[in-house]
Image (cartoon, rainbow, N blue to C red):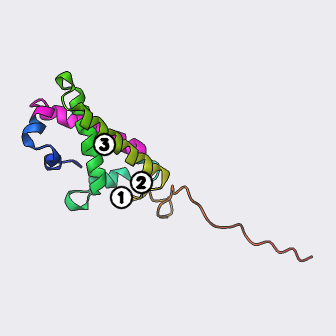
């Protein structure tokens, strides 16, 4: 999977156990929601399947951080009395803002782009360039 348990080092193992309410299934469900959210934001231009297939150091660190923050936000939403929700909510909003920056083209992550049918790279890049065939107006 794209996110590993080691990626939650920012909160520690004991805090992770509390956040997932001692059930790894809760963590996996939150991770699926986080990856789905990221995929829906980036699928138009980036090859999400290849990006999520990367493991270890080959993963984009910012994307991993976004996925972890979004997953932790979803896990904290199910805790009694919303324990630690202020920090989680801020980190969640920061992650969503980062995804919006990627969509707008102001930030370019180190993940593969969608290939075109003829092997063109970055097929869905919103910036196109080129020109029409030259016309000769000699009569």
User: Is the C-beta separation of discs 2 and 1 under 8 Å?
Assistant: yes
Q: Nearer the viewer, residue 98 or 130?
A: 98
Question: What segment carries the magenta color?
Answer: 18-41
Name the N-terminal-most of marks 2 and 1.
Answer: 2
Q: CA distance from mark 3 to mark 1?
A: 14 Å
On the image, the x and y values in percent for residue 88 come to 25, 37
Query: Tag 3's secondary structure?
Result: helix
User: Is residue 43 at all visible to an observer of this figure?
Assistant: no
Distance, label 2 to label 3, CA atoms, is 14 Å
Q: SS class of the residue under badge 2? A: loop
Residue 35, labelled with which disc?
3
Position of 117 with respect to 9 (left or right) is right
Q: Is residue 118 left or right of residue 46?
A: right
In this view, the residue in front, 117 or 124, is 124
- Is 105 drawn above or below residue 23 in the view shown? below
CA gap, disc 2 and disc 1:
7 Å
Which label belongs to residue 111?
Answer: 1
Q: Which residue is mark 2?
A: 46
Marks 2 & 3, CB-CB < 8 Å contact: no
Residue drawn at (43%, 52%), measured in percent from left and top?
102
N-terminal of the pair, mark 3 or mark 1, is 3
Q: Which mark is residue 68?
A: none
The mark that comes first in sequence, 2 or 3, is: 3
**On screen, residue 72 above or below 9:** above
Instruction: Judge the density around disc 1: few (<14), some (14-19), many (≥20) Cα neighbours within 10 Å.
Output: some
Furthest residue toward left: 14
Q: Is residue 135 above or below residue 16?
A: below
Q: Position of residue 21 (x, y in %)?
A: 12, 29
């Amino acid at each position: 999977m794209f996110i590993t348990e080691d990626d939650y080092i920012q909160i520690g193992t004991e805090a992770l156990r509390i956040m997932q309410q001692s059930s790894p299934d809760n963590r996996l469900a939150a991770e699926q929601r986080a990856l789905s959210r990221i995929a829906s934001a980036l699928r138009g231009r980036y090859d999400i399947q290849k990006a999520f297939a990367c493991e270890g150091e080959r993963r984009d660190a910012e994307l991993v951080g976004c996925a972890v923050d979004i997953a932790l936000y979803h896990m904290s939403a199910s805790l009694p009395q919303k324990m630690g929700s202020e920090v989680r909510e801020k980190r969640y909003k920061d992650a969503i803002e980062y995804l919006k920056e990627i969509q707008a083209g102001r930030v370019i992550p180190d993940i593969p782009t969608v290939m075109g049918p003829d092997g063109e790279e970055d097929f869905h890049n919103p910036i196109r360039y080129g020109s029409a065939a030259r016309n000769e107006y000699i009569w």
